[in-house]
Every structure is written in structure tokens, then in C-alpha cells.
Image (cartoon, rainbow, N blue to C red):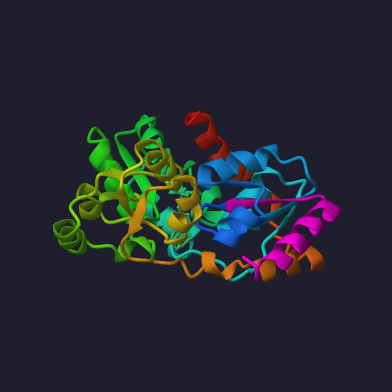
Amino acid sequence: WALHAPYVAAINALKAERGAVILAHNYMRPEIYHGVADVVGDSLQLAIEATRVEAQVIVQAGVHFMAETSKVLNPAKTVLIPDTQAGCSLADAITPAGIAEMRARYPGAPVVSYVNTTAEVKAASDVCCTSSNAVQIVRAQEADTVIMTPDRYLAQNVAAQVPEKNVVWWDGSCIVHERFTAADLRSFREHAPDTRIIAHPECPPDVVAASDFAGSTAAIIDYVSTERPAAAMLLTECSMAANIADAVPGVDFRGPCNLCPYMQMITLEKILWSLHTMTHEVTVDPAVSEGARRAVERMIELSS
Ligand code: 13P
Ligand code: SF4
């Protein structure tokens, strides 16, 4: 912390001067999560909070699609991302042409796109979802066949919970969550049977099936805070355990550490530079923004 303290102090001072708030995803580095964030949360919580921001400037401590979502939902604000290279393998997996291809393959089926997509893809979709409301959103569709993009594992995990729908999917995946395997889990259970295994629904379905609980990053935090297991293994981005460890003393976090290279690109230094230079501003073409807002607002309506 001694190393981080000067940055934390400088950022917090500059934040006040610029009239800025920092919206930070649960995967941010602990010094961001605890030191400078005004709001922390999962993708759904951050999207909802973005609609409520009164400050003129939003610094998105997260990846690019999250900054775009904030801009789309609150277009009058200046939205800054500290590193434009902070992308996402899921957002890279599909384009509007991919959505058109799925619509041609499954005529009449609604397209439910994960928020981990570009604004263009959201605009080409009927509704968005996050990991915390995907089951609810798919269930709410009238059609029997529902297209989910771009995460095949999230789609397969939802399909298992909504057997009444024919869920079809695009072939994308998250480079962090696809690395967890059911075989690793089984051998871990053998060696540490007392450990509660908690997965994110971006993990492969056999991993989710072999876990004790699966949910969005916010749901994982709620589960650990409520259940307080003696030992827990979080099958998600590794910063999460570090971020919540202080709030749940007594829980021994174990297991592999998979970091998201994109989330890790956001650092205190870059946040300070971002506020100092008021860069990098995230803009979305107004026509695209309108379509994307419709899809995200529909999601928020359906999940409230
Ligand atoms: P949630 O925080 O919505 O669970 O999403 C996880 C994720 O991978 C975001 O990039
Ligand atoms: Fe994208 Fe996966 Fe990183 Fe989340 S953890 S930003 S889904 S690559």
C-alpha cells in the first residue's frame, strides 16, 4: 500500500477537481477497488449505476465495452477509459455480421447478446443480458428458439436452467474462464474436500455442474459473504478473491489464479493520467447508441 498511497491520494484529489466518479468492476486490482473506486459492482450493477451518475465525468475502471455501455446509457457525460487496449475476448468474438448470420440461420428467433459486446453488436440485438440476469432474460422471450451471443458457455449454462427453450449460441468464449477444467476440479476436491467451489457462468458447463454454486461476480460476493465457508475456490478472475478477502475474514481462498489481461491493463498510474489529461474519451455514434440503449434498457426493465 505504501507504493500505491501517493497515486491514491493524487487520484482522489483530481477526481474532486474534475467532478469525476470512478465506476470499477469487481475484477479491478485491489488498489483500485479499495483505493479510488466510487462504485464497484458486476456488469449489471455498473450499467445501472451509470444511468444514475450526476457527476460530469465517468472514469470506467473496467474494459472497453463497459465504458461504451456507460456512454450509451448516460450520453451527456464524458466517459474516459484509462487504456483503450482494455478489450475482451468475448466482445472481439462477434460483429453485427455474425448477428445477421444467426438471424438468417434461425429466422424469427430473438437475439440475446451478452453485455460483453460492442455497441454495434448491442444495436443489432433485441435485448442484452449479463451473467446475473441471463436466465431471466431468456425465459422472458416469447419465442421457443432463442439466440444467445457471443458466449457459448454462458448460453449452455443458461440452456441447462431453461429447458423449455431451444437456446442456440455463437461460438465465443472468455479466455479467463475457459481455462478452468472439470478434471482439475475433481483432483482439487480429492485433495481439499472441505473447499467450497464457486464458479462464474462463463466457465464450461461441466465445471459449473461440478461446482457448489455459480453466479455473476456480485452473486459470488453475496454467496461468500452469506455462507462464510472455511475455504473457498473462486473459478473466476483472480483479483476477486483479493478484493473481498478483508470483508470476509476467516475464509481461506485457495486455487488457481487466472488474471484477465485486459482488466489488468487498468492501473492506478493510467487512471491518474486519464484524469490529468482527460483521456481517452469513449464516444459512440448516436445512431448506434440509440439501438444499443434500447437493447440495454430492455434488459434492465426485464431484470427489475
Ligand atoms: P459479471 O461481473 O457481470 O459477472 O461479468 C464478469 C465478466 O467477465 C466481465 O468481464
Ligand atoms: Fe472479457 Fe473474460 Fe476478461 Fe471478462 S474476464 S473482460 S469476459 S476476457
The answer to whether residue 104 shows anywhere in this view is no
Q: Quadrant of residue 131?
A: top left
The correct choice, above or below, for 95 with respect to 21 in the image is below
Q: Position of residue 56 (x, y in %)?
A: 80, 47
Kindly identify the residue that appears in the image at 16 percent across and 62 percent down.
187
Residue 127 sits above or below residue 242 on the image: above
Q: Position of residue 235 (x, y in %)?
A: 33, 56
**Position of residue 281 in the picture relative to residue 105 (left or right):** right
Is residue 174 within the magenta segment? no
Q: In the rendered structure, does residue 12 fall within the stretch colored magenta?
A: yes
Residue visible at 22% across and 36% down in the picture: 163
Q: Position of residue 45 (x, y in %)?
A: 55, 41
- Along the viewing direction, whichever of 76 and 33 lies nearer the viewer: 33
**Outermost residue to the left:** 190
Residue placed most toward the observer, 59 or 239:
239
Provide residue 112's location: percent of width, then percent of height.
42, 44
- Residue 268, quarter of picture: bottom right
Tell me: 238 left or right of 161: right
Magenta span: 1-24
Q: Residue at x 47, y 60 (%)?
A: 239
Q: Residue at x 58, y 55 (%)?
A: 33
Q: Residue furthest front?
A: 250
Query: Where does the N terminus fall, quadrant-wise?
Result: bottom right
Residue 120 visible in the current orientation: yes
Q: Is residue 295 left or right of residue 110?
A: right
